[in-house]
Amino acid sequence: MRLSTNTLLAVLPVFVAAHADHHLHARAQQHARQVPAAAPPPPVASAAGSSSQANVVGTTSSQVAASQSSSPAVAGTSTLPAGSSAASVAGTTSSVSSAAVPSLTVQLQATNPTAVPLASIIPGQVSAATHPLPSTAVAGSVPTFLSNAPPLPTITGLLAANYPPPDRPAPTDSPEVQQWIKEVQDTGVVIPQFSPTNGIGGCANNTAAASDASRCWWTCGGCTRSTDITECPTAMDWGLTYDDGPAFYTPNLLEYLDQEQLKATFFVVGSRVFYNWNMLQSQYMGQHQIAVHTWSHFPLTSLTNEQIIAELGWSRKIIKDVLGVTPNMMRPPYGDIDDRVRAISLAMGLTPVMWTRISPLATFDTDDFNIANGQTSVQQVIQNWENIIGNATTRNSGFIVLEHDLFEQSVEVATGYILPDALGHKNPPFKIQPVIHCLNKDMTDAYIETNNNKTNPPAFQAAVSAGIVTVTGTAAGAKSTGKSAAVTSKSTAGSLWSLAGLALGGLMTLP
């Protein structure tokens, strides 16, 4: 469903919510959420092994407190819990108490019979036991599902001295980072001369950057380039992604994915791989796609060129150390990317993967991350999901949703409610798969060492050919196009989206 600009601006306070990382020293970030679908999906048969047609109302394992709109959002429409103000969703740090949410019925196609009751998925909940890994990777094993892939490295432990400190931007003076800086320079890439954004205050505190259409800043307006992956090309295809792991409850998610024979793309944080390298090996050998989500999860546009290189480089390196292969896709934390970050990422062989945005102010983001910190209730996450699924079924192309495996609450809502509901949707069914597969590519094309460069040109080469980045002189593996599309916006749409992002103003706060 597509709404008019006036409608989107009118409902903005309802749909913008926080996406924060406070416990890991990152600062609060906000961006657009989801709008209600034009109509709820019709009832269909349930998935095997799941409870069907869950008519749910918020206090038991088969109940969800949420509302479902049956018509397009208009001025004055609200899906906020009773007792919550627009400001509490649109940018303050006040918690959304599940006790304050009314029992408003929404119908899920199916739920997991063993799901944790929604009333128990709250901030500060008593932690349940984690499940063992579904399988343990064996050193030296050859991933037979990847042609020409090297054997899995033998690891007895990773040395902290060989990597930067966790959860903070990596230093740029190490020999490794200096080498990566030289490699980027050697590509001949022209990096746009944009100053780093101010990490505090969001669009309202970065008015020049937010209104500069040539910057193509996704955070303030949703601008993308043709090299950004934002959706799956085929209708009803869902590129399943999880960010911020590997983490304590990732094995629980892996167990459910294995049970339902589902594969996903995991955007992993390098410093978390250090502590959970065995999980990463299990994810990889389980035929899930592994991709880069930086070293410390800081917003990339707020960093210098050298820091961006360090963030991507260290994450890329530790994944290679653990798996023997290097991902060729990345997702910027918080979706915080502009043409400066794009140019560096592409020069490092990494294609940006975002999540689907249907307007400047509405994205396919469940906001599951914020259950743990109290900024979003699980009931609102279920409502967000219902809005996403309603919009997804009306699209001419597929979609990508933002979800996370960092916290117990996010994993519980995914395995107990979101995934079972999607699997229960049979008319028509969703095709749930990793991003690489939803792009109609083989898993070998997800890694630099196994990629077929003839049929799937490397990220930087493709970007140069598309005119998204410019090179100078005789760059390695690329020719100068003589034009600077990275600085010249695809204009009218880019300008409108940047202005819409600027209109978000004080409702957005960068990390």
Image: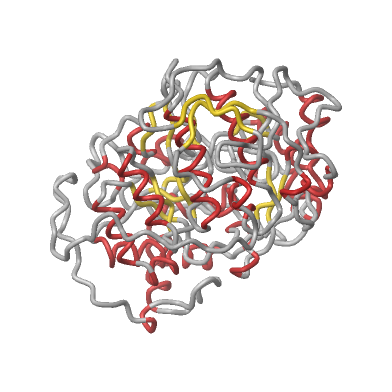
Determine which quarter of the picture holds residue 7: top right
Is residue 153 among the parts visible in the rendering? Answer: yes
The mark total stands at 0
Question: In the depicted view, which residue is nearer to us: 342 or 399?
Answer: 399
Question: In the depicted view, which residue is nearer to us: 55 or 473?
Answer: 55
Question: In the depicted view, which residue is nearer to us: 251 or 197?
Answer: 251
Scheme of image coloration: secondary structure
Residue 315's place in the image compared with 54, above or below, is: below
> Residue 360 location in percent, x, y?
68, 34
Residue 44's place in the image compared with 112, above or below, is: above
User: Quarter of the image containing the C terminus?
Assistant: bottom right
Question: In the depicted view, which residue is nearer to us: 359 or 406?
Answer: 406
Determine which quarter of the picture holds residue 435: top left
Q: Residue at x 69, y 59 (%)?
A: 28
Residue 450's place in the image compared with 499, above or below, is: below
Determine which quarter of the picture holds residue 481: top left
Q: Image check: 176 left or right of 454?
A: right
Q: Image check: 367 left or right of 264?
A: right
Q: Residue at x 34, y 49 (%)?
A: 255
Q: Residue at x 70, y 18 (%)?
A: 70
Residue sticking out furthest to the front: 60
User: Quarter of the image containing the N terminus?
Assistant: top right
> Residue 452 location in percent, x, y?
22, 41
Is residue 492 among the parts visible in the rendering? Answer: no
> Residue 89 location in percent, x, y?
77, 46
> Residue 439 location in percent, x, y?
36, 32
